[in-house]
Each structure stands twice: as C-alpha cells, then as structure tokens.
Amino acid sequence: MRKRTSRETIYRSRSLTSLMLLTLSSAVDEIIAVGRRFDARGMAAATTGNYSVRLENGRIAITVSGCHKGRLVSNDVTQINLDGLPLEAQTPSAEAALHAGVYRLYERVGAVLHVHSVVSTTITRLLPEDTDVVLEGYETLKVLPGVLTHDTRAVIPVFDNSQDMPALARKVRARFATLQVEPPALLLRGHGLYAWGATVEEAERVVEALELMMSCELETLRIGRRM
Amino acid sequence: MRKRTSRETIYRSRSLTSLMLLTLSSAVDEIIAVGRRFDARGMAAATTGNYSVRLENGRIAITVSGCHKGRLVSNDVTQINLDGLPLEAQTPSAEAALHAGVYRLYERVGAVLHVHSVVSTTITRLLPEDTDVVLEGYETLKVLPGVLTHDTRAVIPVFDNSQDMPALARKVRARFATLQVEPPALLLRGHGLYAWGATVEEAERVVEALELMMSCELETLRIGRRM
Amino acid sequence: MRKRTSRETIYRSRSLTSLMLLTLSSAVDEIIAVGRRFDARGMAAATTGNYSVRLENGRIAITVSGCHKGRLVSNDVTQINLDGLPLEAQTPSAEAALHAGVYRLYERVGAVLHVHSVVSTTITRLLPEDTDVVLEGYETLKVLPGVLTHDTRAVIPVFDNSQDMPALARKVRARFATLQVEPPALLLRGHGLYAWGATVEEAERVVEALELMMSCELETLRIGRRM
Amino acid sequence: MRKRTSRETIYRSRSLTSLMLLTLSSAVDEIIAVGRRFDARGMAAATTGNYSVRLENGRIAITVSGCHKGRLVSNDVTQINLDGLPLEAQTPSAEAALHAGVYRLYERVGAVLHVHSVVSTTITRLLPEDTDVVLEGYETLKVLPGVLTHDTRAVIPVFDNSQDMPALARKVRARFATLQVEPPALLLRGHGLYAWGATVEEAERVVEALELMMSCELETLRIGRRM
C-alpha cells in the first residue's frame, strides 16, 4: 500500500484486446453466464454486484436492481444510455451512472463488472484514507491488460463509498483524467471492485486476477511478518 | 461490536417485499432448492440447520429433524402450527418453537432460514456477553430489507444458546418487543444464524449478505489492526 | 484443548442409528458417492483418505491404495477380513488394519471414513503432546451420535502418526478400552481424521460436524483473543 | 523452512509410475479435463497457469498463451519441441522453455502442470531469499512419488521469478543437477507452483498434495504459535 502521488505511470504500452460490440441478445447471454461463474466463485452473494456491456446500438445493457446475479434470466437485463439514464421500464442498477461514466471515459471498454467480494470489501476497509491498493511483483500482474512483466506494480485507485452515484462518477472521472494510462479497475471502500475490459471475458479476467493478488495481500497481512 | 442499549432504531422506513403465501407443494420445492444452494456454499454441514415456510393454509412447513439439508426430499418436510406443535407423524426440527415464534411476531414473514455457518458460530463465541453483532458502513447492508444506504449500521441481536426452545422463543419475543423496527435476523451463541423475510429468496439474501459482512468482520479480527 | 485424564465420560446415553449391513454392490455405490461429496468439499485431495463399509457377509469393503477418492470406480474397492487382511488380488489401503480394528472394537459400526483435511492436519500438528481435541458448547455437537445438548463437550482422541498400522491399531484398542463410551472419531497427528457410524451417512455427518467445529476452533486460534 | 544446503537427499528409492506417452488427441483431452478440475478447486484464476504433456511423437503438447484454463477447447493446445520452440502457428505459453527444460532433464516425466495458487504465491513471497519450502512430518508426503513414510521431509526448491524463461530454465537445470533425486515440483517466487509426473494424474496429485500441505503451513503461520 502507499500514499497517492499526483500522477500514476504504472502501466506500460499495451497490446489491448479489441472492442467488439454485441447485440443485446449476445450481451444478455454473456451477462447471465458471468453471473453464474462469479456465484460459483463466491463473488455474487445475495443481490450484490452489477454487470454491463456496451451494445452495437450505442446503448449499455445492464443488470436490473435487486436480482441475484447467480440466477439471472433475460428479463433481469435492461438498457441505459451513456448518461446512465434508463431506456426501458425496468429499474437499472442503482450504480448505472458509474458504469456509464466508465464507458464515456474509455472508448475501448466494452464491459464493466462489479462485485462485492469479501477480499475487496475487507482490504478497502482496512486501508488508511487516501491510500490505493498497490500490487507489486506478482506474476499474475501480467493478466492485467498491457502488463508484460511481474517486475512492476499496479495501482488500483480506491474511492470512498457514496450513495450519490453521479457525484461519485464525477470524482472518478476527475481523478482518472490525471492518470496517464487507463487503470483496469477501481475499488470502492467497504463496497467492492469495479473492473472493465474490451469484452466481458477480459473484464472477468481482471476481477479474477485482482482477487487472487488481493487474497495474497490479505493472507500476508494475517501472518503479519515474513517467516 | 458494542454493548446493547435499551432501544435499537437502526432500520429505516422500509420498502418491503410483499408476503406471498405458498401451497405445501411449492414450499417443499423451495425448501429443497435452498438446502442445495446452502450446501454448495458450505452452510449445510452434516444435519445442521432447518428451514420453514408459512403456508396459505396458515400452517408452517418445516424440515424434519436429523436430515441432511443438502439432500432433502419431499418427505423431509412436515407441518407445524403457529404454536410450533407438530401436525403430522414426522418429528419437526427441535427448533420448531423458535420458527413459530418469528411467524407469530412478524406477520409479514413468510420464510425462516437457520444455518450453522463457521462464521456465525465463531463470531458469536468470540463476542463478550450481552453484546450484539453490529455491522457498519458496508454497501452490502443495502441487501437487508428496508436499508437504503451503506451509511448506517445494522444490529443483529445475539442470544445465548439453549435447548429449551419455548423459553428461548419467549426471550426473543420479549426482547424484540422493545425494538422499534423488525430485525432481519438473530444469532444464537455457538449455534448459528436465523434469518427471515417475506419469501425464501428474501430470507436467503439476508443469510448471504450477513455471511459476507460477518466474514469481513472476522477477516479484520484476524488481521487485528489497520494497515 | 486439555490434558488427558484417565477416563472420559463425555458421551451420554445414546439413541443410536441401527447398523444395516450392505451387499458389496451397495457398499461400492455408497463409497463412490461419499468420495465425490468429500472431494467437492475439499476433503479428498490427491489420493488422500480411505473409506470402508461392513458387509452382510462379514467382510469389509475398503478402497484400494493410491486412487483419487473423488473419482472412484467400482474396481477401486476391494475386500478385507476383520483382521485387516486382503481377500482379493488388489492391495487395500495401507491403513486397512486401523479400519478393521474399529469394526472389531465396536459391533454397531457399519462404516469408517478417513480424510486428510487441512483443518484436522493443522490442528493436530499444533496440539501439544498427549492432548486431545476438546469441543465444548457448540450446538453442532448434537450431530455426534448420542449427544443431546450443546451444553457438553466431546473429546476426540489424538494419536501420534505411525506407518506401523497394526501397532497403531493396538494402541487405539488399548486406549479405547479405557473409555466408558464409544467415541465418534479419532485424530492422527499431522495425518487426519477417522470417523465412524452405523452407516456411511452417519459417519459422513460426524466428519462434517467435526470439520465445522474444528474450523471454528482454528478460526478462534487465528484471532487469538476474544473481541 | 530452512536454508539450502549443498545437496538434498530427501527422497527415497522410488516405486515410480511408468511413463505412458499419449497421442495428441488424448493429451488434449487430459489437459482440458485437468484445467476444469483445477478451476473448480480455485487454482485457475483468470488466464493463469499452463499445462503440458509429452507426446508419443517426441513433441510436447502445451496450452497456448492467454486462455482461461477452466474453459479450454482443443484449439487452446499447441505443440512445441524439446527446446521449447513452437511447431505450430499458435503462440505457446510464455513459459514453454521451462516446461521443455523439465522434460529434457527427467526422461520419466510425461506431464508438467503449473498453477498460480494463492497458497504457493503467498508462501514464496513470505520466504526469505535462498530458502526452500520444507514439508516435514505430514502423512500426505506419501502422495509424492517415491515417498513411503510421513517421517521424512520434502524440500521444494524455490527460484526467483524471471521473464527470461530460457535463463530461468538454465538455473533450474543447474541446480537440479546437484540433486541426488528428482524433486516432484518447484516454486517460483510470487508466481506459483510447477509439478510433474509420469502422467497428468500423477502431476495433478503432486499439485493437490503440495497445496494441502502448504495450506497447513500457512494456517500454522497465521496462528503463529502452538496451542
């Protein structure tokens, strides 16, 4: 862990996955499938989390509010626009504005996945204020888009939690504007992890890789010392 | 964690799920299904736990004593009345009186789920006497019925374990009568978690949400300090 | 945990499951099924563990040496006699003598299940010499055959590990002869858990219940103090 | 844990599984299956890990770079030669040279499996420099090829991580040349575990057995003392 500095330059030049825009029907299928996988990994407790995909029609497909992500059906996915506003009768996730904010910020992003895992919730509650999660020296860092070596570090920005999603989205936008490279994820304190990528699969990989590395960080904190 | 005060006012005005009374057949299906899901999550070891549903005929469907909750069959569910007394030949769960007590206390409750998880057993054994579990600042608090923000705290009342279920049910009733709002769950020391809701699904969400947050609490206790 | 005293009287009068002797074919089916369940619970790593069932012909069906218990086939089960000696061409588990010893000691035992779990391995390595695992105050104690309240304690005898199975079986026999009631299980230091019952299902319940309670014990040790 | 000495003589005379060379088609089937099993055990997060099998044509079948090991399809396996060089259009795992090095070093090895588990990543990050993982007194040691008793110890060599795989392969070769017996596995610091055997099944057993024992080691470190 470490205090924030004014500018982060941790990510190297990237060989990025290309954005591939989906039809609503394909997006729904991918969202249902990733929900099942996250649930099997213990990352979709109760109605926590929400998932979205950028569609070929310029809209965003996003899970509706209050459903269990491990047992999604087609009707649990609705559409919003890039301002996070609902385009259908169903209520989208309360965090629609944050999803929309990521899509507006990064053109290459095709999917945003958010989970409340025990690991991401605990680690962000333990962190001092204004401190980000820094992962350093892990081979698994190479899973993050554009990272080519273990001999680097990734800074995952941490934001204080808020119920005012548009305000939170603005804070994210403001801080990310100061970063030279696109981060692969962000953390909300006591809340969970947001990760993104060109595809659902790429965003899912970021979730799994960060979970693995943050699990190692927590394990190390438990032990509290080198052997 | 914190000492009890005379009155708890932690829950806000609620947008509650409506009670939907089930036929016995539907209740049995839901009970079997939730048992499988809890078992897959490691919350149905051996013959631990018991589950009940309020029926449209005014009776309570409840698991029989001594069966494995991950492999329930129709015959493992019997009926009791609102006094917790058996209405069929099979022996209901030894904790029938506690289930019945919750249904008598809260008219909107349609399902009660009880699990012996490692997390709920350990945390209640570690707590000092007369101390409740207090969960504060978690986004996942919003899963609890009626909670609309992370910026609150939920008090989950803890009772000492007892084999005298009618006496324990009376203690619960007496203490709950002093609460201004209906709590979503209670804990029995060294025993486990009881959670309830309008539907099996709502009660299950409470179990999963509390497990997630209490797992974070235990994780934090393991580490024993902020970073 | 506590030092051994000369006699243990922790188990109460029992309402025991009746012994039901199986055909070889039924025993094989039950052994294959319990192996899959243990593997799903993370209790059948590599080729660890072995399982046996008392047959209606007076023989013992037991897993052969060196197979993965999560993927057993019929051919992975062989027969031994009550002295632990092989009755077929295949090599039975190296621990056949210990299984046989339990069947000779307790007539009502119909199944013996042995697992190398992380929990049982770790807890027995941490225990001082000549110290047993004592579980006290857990509601889940009631899963153990004959235990009717949480307000008791169960002593699970711990033996030092050995490659001389007949000698180890004799030590178990000698110590168990001093006990007034049949224990539900034993632990081998740095090795794992043996549990038994009238049926595979009863023995499995003992494994799951002890795993749950020993997990709570380890969790408490990790935290190292009351809150 | 302990400092390295010049020569390790921990493994006893072996009763080794015979090498059985596979066709490409069989190798692909086994690789896909072991990936699913590792994923179910939480040992195939994101795109981590890679698996290879020695073929009857003298080549090596190996997973291609960047695919999720829990959802492999036939096309995710390619072929390399014993120098680690690609023989097909697809890019093999970046760690092909290390796999090839193990096959060149040990003629009896038919499969090499590599995983980034939380346990192996954490334990190697905690270890002081030039220190190996030493596992002692575990019954589960007997799962390792050629080990016949718990009353021994296994040294799993630890190497510093590197992105220069040919150089790392040379370091492994140089150090292994000083060992009297073939080790069953090696660890890369902050990276993960490599294990091998005559067959995929034997290598998988080594992974599972080492995970179990290293989990016990970490659990003991968490507790930090005997009870």
Image (cartoon, coloured by chain):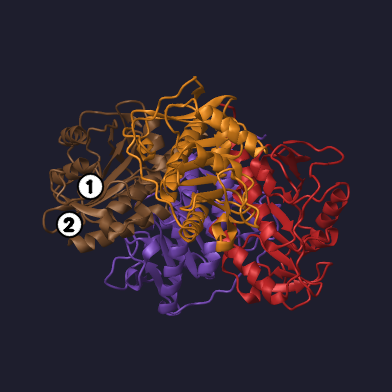
Chain colours: A red, B purple, C brown, D orange
Give the chain of mark 2.
C
Q: Mark 1 or mark 2: which is in front?
A: 1
Label annotation for residue C19: 2
User: Dot 2: within a 10 Å radius of its alpha carbon, few (fewer than 14), some, or many (20 or more) residues?
Assistant: some
**Along the viewing direction, whichever of D195 and B145 lies nearer the viewer:** D195
Residue located farthest toward the left when viewing the structure as drawn: C57
Label annotation for residue D148: none
* Left or right: B221, with D143 as reference point: right
At mark 2, the secondary structure is loop
Q: Residue at x 54, y 59 (%)?
A: A40
Query: Which quadrant of the structure image shows residue D184?
Result: top left
At mark 1, the secondary structure is loop
* Left or right: C49, with D117 as reference point: left
Give the chain of mark 1.
C
User: Do discs 1 and 2 belong to a common subunit?
Assistant: yes
Query: Which quadrant of the structure image shows residue B143?
Result: bottom right
Residue B32's spot in the image, x, y percent?
Answer: 42, 69
Q: Amino acid at mark 2?
A: Leu
* Left or right: A33, with C171 as reference point: right
**Along the viewing direction, whichever of A193 and A16 lies nearer the viewer:** A16
Q: Amino acid at mark 1?
A: Pro
Residue C54's spot in the image, x, y percent?
Answer: 17, 54
Distance between the alpha carbons at the discs numbered 1 and 2? 23 Å
Residue located farthest toward the front when viewing the structure as drawn: D57
User: Dot 1: within a 10 Å radius of its alpha carbon, few (fewer than 14), some, or many (20 or more) residues?
Assistant: many
Tell me which label, 1 or 2, sits earlier in the chain. Answer: 2
Residue B129 visible at all: no
**Along the viewing direction, whichever of A210 and A186 lies nearer the viewer:** A210
Q: Which quadrant is the N terminus of chain A positioned in?
A: top right
Residue B67's spot in the image, x, y percent?
Answer: 33, 62
In this figure, which residue is indicated by the disc labeled 1? C92
